[in-house]
Amino acid sequence: MDQDHLRTLLEEVQRGAVPVETALDRMRHLPFEDLGYAKLDHHRALRHGLTEVIFGMGKTPGQVASIAVRLLEKSANLLVTRADDAIAAELKSICSEAEYFPLSGAVRVWRDRTIRGKGKIAVVCAGTSDIPIAEEAQLTVEVMGNEADCIHDIGVAGIHRLIANSERLMQARVVVVCAGMEGALPSAVGGLVSVPVIAVPTSVGYGASFQGLAALLGMLNSCASNVTVVNIDNGFGAGYVASLINRL
Amino acid sequence: MDQDHLRTLLEEVQRGAVPVETALDRMRHLPFEDLGYAKLDHHRALRHGLTEVIFGMGKTPGQVASIAVRLLEKSANLLVTRADDAIAAELKSICSEAEYFPLSGAVRVWRDRTIRGKGKIAVVCAGTSDIPIAEEAQLTVEVMGNEADCIHDIGVAGIHRLIANSERLMQARVVVVCAGMEGALPSAVGGLVSVPVIAVPTSVGYGASFQGLAALLGMLNSCASNVTVVNIDNGFGAGYVASLINRL
Amino acid sequence: MDQDHLRTLLEEVQRGAVPVETALDRMRHLPFEDLGYAKLDHHRALRHGLTEVIFGMGKTPGQVASIAVRLLEKSANLLVTRADDAIAAELKSICSEAEYFPLSGAVRVWRDRTIRGKGKIAVVCAGTSDIPIAEEAQLTVEVMGNEADCIHDIGVAGIHRLIANSERLMQARVVVVCAGMEGALPSAVGGLVSVPVIAVPTSVGYGASFQGLAALLGMLNSCASNVTVVNIDNGFGAGYVASLINRL
Amino acid sequence: MDQDHLRTLLEEVQRGAVPVETALDRMRHLPFEDLGYAKLDHHRALRHGLTEVIFGMGKTPGQVASIAVRLLEKSANLLVTRADDAIAAELKSICSEAEYFPLSGAVRVWRDRTIRGKGKIAVVCAGTSDIPIAEEAQLTVEVMGNEADCIHDIGVAGIHRLIANSERLMQARVVVVCAGMEGALPSAVGGLVSVPVIAVPTSVGYGASFQGLAALLGMLNSCASNVTVVNIDNGFGAGYVASLINRL
Amino acid sequence: MDQDHLRTLLEEVQRGAVPVETALDRMRHLPFEDLGYAKLDHHRALRHGLTEVIFGMGKTPGQVASIAVRLLEKSANLLVTRADDAIAAELKSICSEAEYFPLSGAVRVWRDRTIRGKGKIAVVCAGTSDIPIAEEAQLTVEVMGNEADCIHDIGVAGIHRLIANSERLMQARVVVVCAGMEGALPSAVGGLVSVPVIAVPTSVGYGASFQGLAALLGMLNSCASNVTVVNIDNGFGAGYVASLINRL
Amino acid sequence: MDQDHLRTLLEEVQRGAVPVETALDRMRHLPFEDLGYAKLDHHRALRHGLTEVIFGMGKTPGQVASIAVRLLEKSANLLVTRADDAIAAELKSICSEAEYFPLSGAVRVWRDRTIRGKGKIAVVCAGTSDIPIAEEAQLTVEVMGNEADCIHDIGVAGIHRLIANSERLMQARVVVVCAGMEGALPSAVGGLVSVPVIAVPTSVGYGASFQGLAALLGMLNSCASNVTVVNIDNGFGAGYVASLINRL
Amino acid sequence: MDQDHLRTLLEEVQRGAVPVETALDRMRHLPFEDLGYAKLDHHRALRHGLTEVIFGMGKTPGQVASIAVRLLEKSANLLVTRADDAIAAELKSICSEAEYFPLSGAVRVWRDRTIRGKGKIAVVCAGTSDIPIAEEAQLTVEVMGNEADCIHDIGVAGIHRLIANSERLMQARVVVVCAGMEGALPSAVGGLVSVPVIAVPTSVGYGASFQGLAALLGMLNSCASNVTVVNIDNGFGAGYVASLINRL
Amino acid sequence: MDQDHLRTLLEEVQRGAVPVETALDRMRHLPFEDLGYAKLDHHRALRHGLTEVIFGMGKTPGQVASIAVRLLEKSANLLVTRADDAIAAELKSICSEAEYFPLSGAVRVWRDRTIRGKGKIAVVCAGTSDIPIAEEAQLTVEVMGNEADCIHDIGVAGIHRLIANSERLMQARVVVVCAGMEGALPSAVGGLVSVPVIAVPTSVGYGASFQGLAALLGMLNSCASNVTVVNIDNGFGAGYVASLINRL
């Protein structure tokens, strides 16, 4: 993806070997990368900020491992989401620093622990069943260079506990809230803090929760204006956006 | 619906004019009411407890008025829900005591104001747009002989105001909560009080509120165990059940 | 959660060690519980009325057992819902009085059998497949101090059997009705009785029952005004609300 | 649509003017009707049995009238469904025997009133708002040569009235049941009678009735095995099938 | 469920031991069956016409067997739907005449093979994957005393085969059509025949078939007026209604 | 959008005024069009092939007219879809050749009537109510340079008429089929022809047609493998793709 | 909402007029605001940052005006969303600086134009029909003290124009993307930039767009990890969150 | 399915053994195939063009094998879709040339590799998880006599890679695009090329992807006019239609 073809062409123009019109014509047929847009990809690399991520679901341990080997050559940190015991074992065998978090199914290599975020990111969840998703968010937040403040088991039906934690919530620069069932917690948290709240509906619940649909709709209709929403169970996405915001 | 046919038959049995087996056989072909089950209907009348209700939507002013005339002969009170200006005008012309509440579209004749409920019924709503539904609940609660305590504009995103009203909420024997959008208020209220909470999802909202579906699902998935739910915008139903409970 | 911090502060104010304005300022930063709102939690404890409940689904036997041990120290009764054989075995090993009900997956410790409800609670179900949900409701109702009257296998298509049980239904102070498929039973029962009916849609059925959605929608649209609805398969919730009502 | 082409061809084969193989080849390219299948269409005409039907919705008065003129030339009876005042006026101007039923929006020309059905068809509806759909069913049933027995305002929540009408229901050879809201009436009727029940969900209701979806799902999940279902508000379809059955 | 109580009461009236008014009063409190309505249940028994049906899904082999033993005492025939290998084995052990049809999961005892239906019932299905549902319909139709004419593998996309079978279809008195995917076959068949068509959407398909929803909606919107619909995969229901119609 | 900037830069490189490395660097910051990719847009213009299209819905007559004026300067033909009387009037005032088709709401300027497609495109519709959508498809097909063969009023329930038209259908190179209600026609047509069939679900129907959803699902599940689907009521899209295919 | 009651109580404790235990007890019954939590509300005021917002939909011009008068006393800026001509006229009559934006239905009073955000916020939309929602986002962003860079009419099907604007997009600190139909633009933009993207599904489209549902689902499933989503048509919410982020 | 009956009849007409009218009458009762329409079926065979296809899902290895044996007698090529290891083993045992593709679950016998398509068919997919569906499309395209150009892993969020492949895309005569999650890739590809794009939504994703529904809706609402859609995961269907188009 270097720009050798383009440089060669320009040098030919420079020394008169290729006329300008011919050069213009050839440039139309050069592969895209040669025309200066490689920077797009470069930006992409920068954006991930030292951390590469592999979505493990539907990949074999071997596939994940071979991608991981390649990524770990140029990156200090690595996060594998939606992994399982087999993937985790394979990853540990190729990288002794890999840690496995079975609750969320994440594997993390966290060699560079520099803090890059400007403040704390609170990761809140409503019930113990939401903890796997909250853990995925927390691991993402940390591996991307942020301090995470995790507050578990705060429900809308227990306002008391919510208020008891309001000081901690107010000290965060961004808040991630994971909740299943009626998905009301982001509204309540959003009313307490003055920073962006990233809401993660979880598929926790039964019956008319419809695998997270009830929580998703609830969060999209939040009466708190500082709430935005990611996909059901997308703890990684919430942690990722929270990290982007926290670097601004 | 009297029992004359059955009495006549029994008298014929008594005086030997009809054998027992013949009587048994005839009884099988008597209309149902003659067989003692008229009491079912009687119970029904008792159950409505002095208040008759007409669902106005889809009826002409003339139809509503003619039903109303008949009901007011035997009942001191009358509630017409989902009425409009024309129905209200017609009803006022036949009954000077009829009051029209244009917000909820209810017309009420409230001649017997005896308190029959054992405690107060709190009628709570989340936003000003929920007031029409809350008003329908309140009017139902009152006309059925209860004291209503109306608390408007309490949102989950403003926990502060919710707690400020917690004393009032705790003094109610039953609570009706009307909320649109994410429908989270019943959970929060349910967590504060120890009495039954009747949740009314309202069709207030836009986009992914899907005309009250988001609120309905939210309430059905409430993490507070004392919450039950009625149909979207069914303020009357919530007020009716709350009144039944408050008489127990 | 005592109020020691606040008491100490007030004593300092009393003896002049801390000026009023300083006290006001400090109070703003005290944890919530110290400011008098601990009563909220206290109310919560009271509300559960001697019975603690654990939602077993998604918890390991060990987790359930450790919560149970803690709860049983201060509570005579305990209900674990959505448990399985492994959880039940673990619970029996720590508490010999634990009974396991494999149909509904409930485990119950029922040491204090005082009757606290003022009347009977009827628990009705439509078909034999609804019995697990009805059982969950019944166990809840009983462990919370009520007499349950269970009537199984009453369907809308067999009106005969429904009417044959109408006397029993009319003697209940609250009725819980569990039904899958078209979910029509609560309407029929609601038309017979004059007390609140808590309807539980069950996920029984196939095809267009859509795991209980048909029954849920049917119940929300009930033409009987005394019907309120809980989540699909939420026998516990129905039993809980019925118990709350029966104590009023 | 006569078979002239085919007859001509066969005559040419008969007199040796066309060899058999050529005839076989030509027959492959003859229009379909010439090959004896015109009887299909003939069956279709027979099937409608003296009554032609026009679906009025989305057609102009002029379009409906011109179709009606053509149909009335060969048919004694005509039914126009989903018409409006303008269509009705136009039809009356071309046929003095046309009757307009504004409730259901039907226009009927009923010149041949011969009874062709073998028994009575009961047309039952749950509430007054279902009457328009029931009327469409009744008009269809009658114009197709059946005696209709209309029973209005029988609800599942008023079992008493249902049983009071059970004798009439049991005398029908087919039953059409129209119901909105939870759509439970067909199950209850189906449990009382031993003949086929055609269920028509109506779009009557609000909120979670979702324009008839709740009633539709309820009817499809009916616990009575003798119930089949037609589209929401399709009174005509129910009446049509009931008539077909009643002629068998 | 005999009428002894009522007879005794009438005899007391006859001999003057109980006055008429007292008798009237007592009758109000007699259980329902004693009042002559036992005939309702009797009708029910008659209606099933010698064949008893057990819905096997969700029942243990033991439960099914014990119900079967009781039913087979008074009924020559028995149909168990949605059974599995274990249930079938259990049933064969208690009744040597039980036949198991593993495709549809039905077990049938067919001792009385009298033909009671007045004509043939055609059972049609679209693809080989629809055969299990069609088989359930066929077994029901046969065990209820009808001759079934089974036509498999006729699709809308192969009109040729449909027309090739049109004569057979036209000879049926009722037609049952099972189809998954787009569910278009009932419309095509309905256009060919002049008798009632019972459509059974099957859950066959993938992706946007949504487990039979696409077929269900297609059938409800059929442009053929002689089509009614039963629940997804409800072959039994279709066969049952077809049998009822065929006896008329 | 010319390439002047790039040419100038290359000339500077040619005459030595700008070193190669500087040129490479500047090229990274040039606007995209200057780098040779303008051809993308050029392709786009070519693709529309002499016909420009304006989607009229939600635009004012003035907005549509001003876009039309600009497009007609460089294009012989123009199609405006989803227009209304006001837009049509405005367009006629600026271009006397504009024709308005009120049924489909299309306005067409068709000055260049050269045939570019290689065969005929059949445009088929099921009922008269589907004609507006079929007309939109037909107008698109024609204005893009194809001969359209329109066949109206062919339904799945009238197989006879379908087969009567099979020869015409088999002569088309592409077939567009518009159908509402159960949307079964594309399957039947797809089974008759061996060319691609573009299916357009229409929003025609009522009740469980859910504004075209039933037809859409039916078409997506078509058992004919040569069927692809466009959005509900998207006659233009179907005509557009059919035209693309017909030029290949 | 001052703390007078609490101060008075503390002074009484200070001078010995009230014992500590009595004070503790009284504090439990003081209204919430007196206990130091008024700061919550204060935070809330701060959070809105000089700009008050009124949701106009469903309010009368008089209601909006009276709220506006009160808010404008303490706030330099005011935004009214979802207003109409009548509300706009009323607001202009009470505040001459009110500007009306009929496209989005917003009214804005923008007296304090201080820039508070740290960077630019790009507001992008896919088609001209999305402009009203984009305008609502832009007005919100501006009135909250940010510089908005509006880029209209960039679609996924015209990648060329998207890339042509990539430099502008890369200069934004936050990006708001409004798109209807398939809602794919946020993914494409998210892949180009390394900052948070707030996606707003719009209800633009027809047929299977289902009033914005297709766009909403598309955005929630975005393959770009920096995308979060707000409710359908919620331009205000997106602008609000973007402003919060831009102040961090 | 020969035409012997018809030929015999014509010969009898020819030699005068059967009069014309009798022949006409008999023809009405001949089976359909004898009347010349066998060509329909013949067309069908031709249409599949040397390749027979078996849908393996839900069939036993034995069933698939016996169909395969029969088809391979008259066809050089065979494609079995949705097979599994057992089916593949069975097929290999009966035909040594059978190749198994475990990713897509396809088995292919590809003995006749003649190229029949006029150009290349590009088969594009968005992510590695979409490869199984893309493979099914590719295998179909190839076995039907086309050259497939497979481009994997091109996402909307990586526009760079999309443009880098634009030359290859522009060289295809038809493009198949498989994408899950938000399903936006067909729009982006459709904007780059001027040929038909067949979009295949895949069930790849989680949460609000709802098993491919999000992708399906996105594709149906594509803003690129050259996109048509097939069922979720229907790689075969897309490949089939693409092949049909490529032969035109």
Image (cartoon, coloured by chain):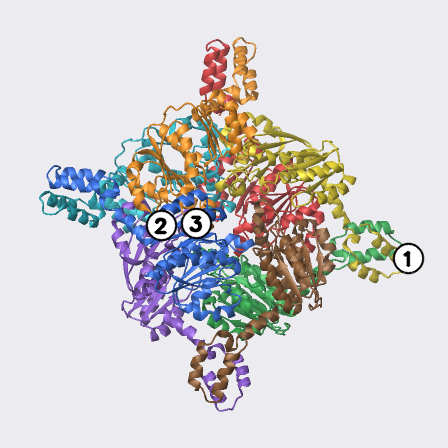
Chain colours: A green, B blue, C purple, D orange, E cyan, F yellow, G brown, H red
Q: Chain of mark 2?
A: C
Which residue corresponds to the image point at 42% horizontal and 84% vertical from the top-left? G21
Q: Amino acid at mark 1?
A: Arg
Q: Taking C172 as reference, is B148 left or right?
A: right
- In the picture as drawn, the residue positioned furthest to the right comes out as F15
Q: Could you classify mark 1 by the number of other residues whose Cα lies within 10 Å: few (under 14), some (14-19), or many (20 or more)?
A: few
Q: Chain of mark 3?
A: C
Please name whichever residue, F115 or B236, is drawn nearer the observer in this view of the structure: B236
Q: Quadrant of residue F98?
A: top right
Q: Which numbered tag is attached to residue C210?
A: 3
User: Looking at the picture, does residue B202 appear above or below residue A158?
Assistant: above
Q: Amino acid at mark 2?
A: Ser
Residue E59 seen by the camera: no
The residue that mark 1 highlights is F15
Circle 2 sits in a helix, a strand or a loop, which is it?
Answer: helix
User: Looking at the picture, does residue F153 appear above or below residue B5?
Assistant: above
Q: Quadrant of residue F191?
A: top right
Please name whichever residue, C162 or B18, is drawn nearer the observer in this view of the structure: B18
Question: Residue A49, percent across and down?
Answer: 65, 67
Distance between the alpha carbons at the discs numbered 1 and 3: 75 Å
Q: Could you classify mark 3 by the number of other residues whose Cα lies within 10 Å: few (under 14), some (14-19), or many (20 or more)?
A: some
Circle 3 sits in a helix, a strand or a loop, which is it?
Answer: helix
Give a yes or no on whether discs 1 and 3 share a subunit.
Answer: no
The residue that mark 2 highlights is C187
